[in-house]
Each structure stands twice: as C-alpha cells, then as structure tokens.
Amino acid sequence: MVLSRWKILGLFVFISLICSSCIRNKNVSFDVIDATIFDGWYCINSIRIEKNGYVHILTSCITKGQKFYTTTLNNDVLDTISDMANNLFTERIDTFYNNDCCDCGAFRLIVKSADKRIETAGIGLGKETNETAKEFIKYLKKIISKTENTYENQLQFESKTREFYPVPPPPVPQHL
C-alpha cells in the first residue's frame, strides 16, 4: 500500500496538532506557592503547588483527623494559578490583613519565584484583604476541596510553621 504525498502530509499535520496540544507553551510565573488556610472552627488546610504542577495538601480537621493528598494540576488550572500569582507580584500586597473577626478563619500565603517573594497573612477574607489575594485564597480552597488521591507523605509547609498573628513589638520601657 503506497501512501500519496497528500495523505502523508495530512497524517503529519494531524499528528502535529495532537502533539502540540500536549506541549506546554506558557511559562509559569512562580517556583512554589505555599498556603495554609484555617476555617475558623475545625480545619486547617495547607497546600503547596510546585511550578511543574505537583500539588501536596495536608488537611487537619478535628472531626476527620489528618490526611495527606497529592495530585497534578492540568495545564489550564496551572495557567490560571500562574496568572493569579503574576497579578500578586505586580500589586502592592500588605504583610497582614486584619478583618477584625474572631471566628472567620485565617490564612498565610507565600508565593516565590526566582527573583520575587510575597508573604502575606490575614484574619478572614473581608473588605480589608487585597482582592487579588482574596480571590487567590478562594481558588486554592477549591483545589483543596477537589483533591481525592490520597497517600502518606511528610512534606513540611513553610506557611504552617508560624502563627497567623504577627509577633507583637517588645514592651516600651516606662521612664519615671
């Protein structure tokens, strides 16, 4: 069976189109995203996203115990996260947002690239919180809630190693 030049060319174009959809064309704007989110009552969730799309999640709930999850993000989700991280890098982000809510939860977010680092935290996701940071935390919460592939690991989350509240300044000496 002899294939004509047009059939070979058509087959080549078809294979090229299929393979090009599997290749990642967009650069990721971050190296690591590390976040810890406390719901204010029962659960603390930590998520670490690496630039290759690997995700590690630790959920720790009073009612469900502690579980470790891992997954790989598809390119569309990774592109969305990369765009959101890039927006954070271009905005002015405070290191702490206090929404004056005692049971609204809290978050700590660390986003690192080769030459940039953002670290922010907050009480709740109220009006005081930067809108881009707020949407980013909400998107990370969606990823956490959709993760189902469970395995045990011992990954350490940098964002979980510190308290949510800033360290208070030292007391001012009293002069007599």
Image (tube, grey):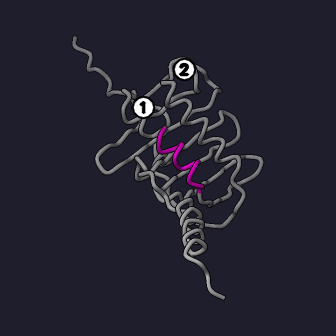
Location of residue 73 (image quadrant): bottom right
Residue marked by disc 2: 99
Q: Main secondary structure of the magenta part?
A: helix
The C terminus lies in quadrant: top left
> What whole-number distance in Å separates the C-alpha atoms at marks 2 and 1?
14 Å
SS category of the residue bearing label 1? loop
Residue marked by disc 1: 166
- The amino acid pointed to by label 2 is Asn
Residue at 68 percent across and 43 percent down: it is 43
SS category of the residue bearing label 2? loop
- The amino acid pointed to by label 1 is Pro
Rendering coords of residue 100 (x, y %)? 56, 18
22 or 36: nearer the eye? 22
Looking at the rendering, the stretch of residues picked out in magenta corresponds to: 73-83
Mark 2 Cα within 10 Å, few/some/many (few <14, many 20+)? some
Residue at 54 percent across and 36 percent down: it is 136
Rendering coords of residue 99 (x, y %)? 54, 20
Judge whether residue 82 is colored magenta: yes
Q: In the current view of this chain or complex, which residue is farthest to the left?
A: 176
Count of numbered circles in the view: 2
Rendering coords of residue 74 (x, y %)? 60, 55
Q: Is 40 above or below relative to 24? A: above
